[in-house]
Image (cartoon, coloured by chain):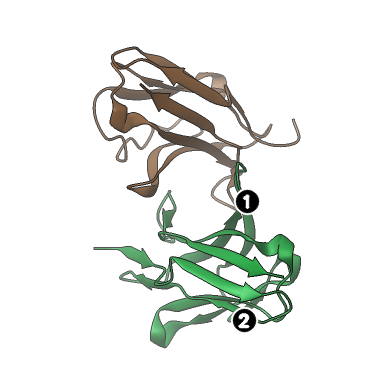
Chain colours: A brown, B green
Amino acid sequence: GAGVSQSPSNKVTEKGKDVELRCDPISGHTALYWYRQSLGQGLEFLIYFQGNSAPDKSGLPSDRFSAERTGGSVSTLTIQRTQQEDSAVYLCASSFSGSQEFFGPGTRLTVL
Amino acid sequence: AQSVTQPDIHITVSEGASLELRCNYSYGATPYLFWYVQSPGQGLQLLLKYFSGDTLVQGIKGFEAEFKRSQSSFNLRKPSVHWSDAAEYFCAVRPKAGNMLTFGGGTRLMVKP
């Protein structure tokens, strides 16, 4: 596609439920990133995928967060047992081998 | 600890006036440097980046930034601001051997008519 796409654009869920957020990177981009943007914490790195290498999970805030990237393309970020502090905009970005990162429009997650 | 600081949380300028947004970083070695803009409800758009070479970098939308190693700064400038420049601006760095961006807290720019 022309750019990074994310779905859904908005997600409202109840505390304790699991959610899945999807990212479609730019075709051919080998690197994929997830960031979180929240009022209290600003923009934070969550996880990084590069090709077939093991992902860099150093930014995941707890073991309730996980992500996978299937076939080196689409990625899903899963948050289990959501908490109110998980409310944020989740941004996905992709790049070709460490060059400029292109960001998607984000998924706004609201946990009630 | 590595950090990026944008000292100004909010800035208001008149349309047509000049603009400078400040960014300071604290890293062991000079990282790659970026400025992004985020309009309401939008994702992040890259304005410009510095990897090496000429320390004055030109970007899109008439923006430029100057890397000053001695001050660990990468300030963003525009000679004449347009109303459409109202947005939030983020400075970011990435270590040359690293994988991810570290962002400053952002500066929200408002433009008065």
Q: Is residue A22 visible?
A: no
Q: Is residue A7 above or below residue B20?
A: above
Amino acid under label 2? Answer: Asp
Q: Residue at x 76, y 35 (%)?
A: A2
Q: Is residue A101 above or below residue B58?
A: above
> Quadrant location of the N terminus of chain A?
top right
Chain ID at mark 2: B
Where's residue A96, x and y in %? 61, 44
Task: Answer left or right for B70 relative to A9.
Answer: left
Q: Residue at x 56, y 71 (%)?
A: B12
Quarter of the image for residue A72 reads top right
- Reading the image, the residue beneath label 1 is B39
Label 1 element class: loop
Where's residue B98, x and y in %? 40, 53
Q: CA distance from mark 1 to mark 2?
A: 29 Å
Q: Specify few, some or many for label 1: CA neighbours under 10 Å numbering under 14, 14-19, or 20 or more.
A: some
Q: Is residue A72 above or below residue B86?
A: above
> Quadrant location of the C terminus of chain A?
top left
Label 2 element class: loop
* Nearest the eye: B46 or A105: A105
Which residue of the protein is positioned furthest toward the front in this rendering?
A: B113
- Reading the image, the residue beneath label 2 is B54
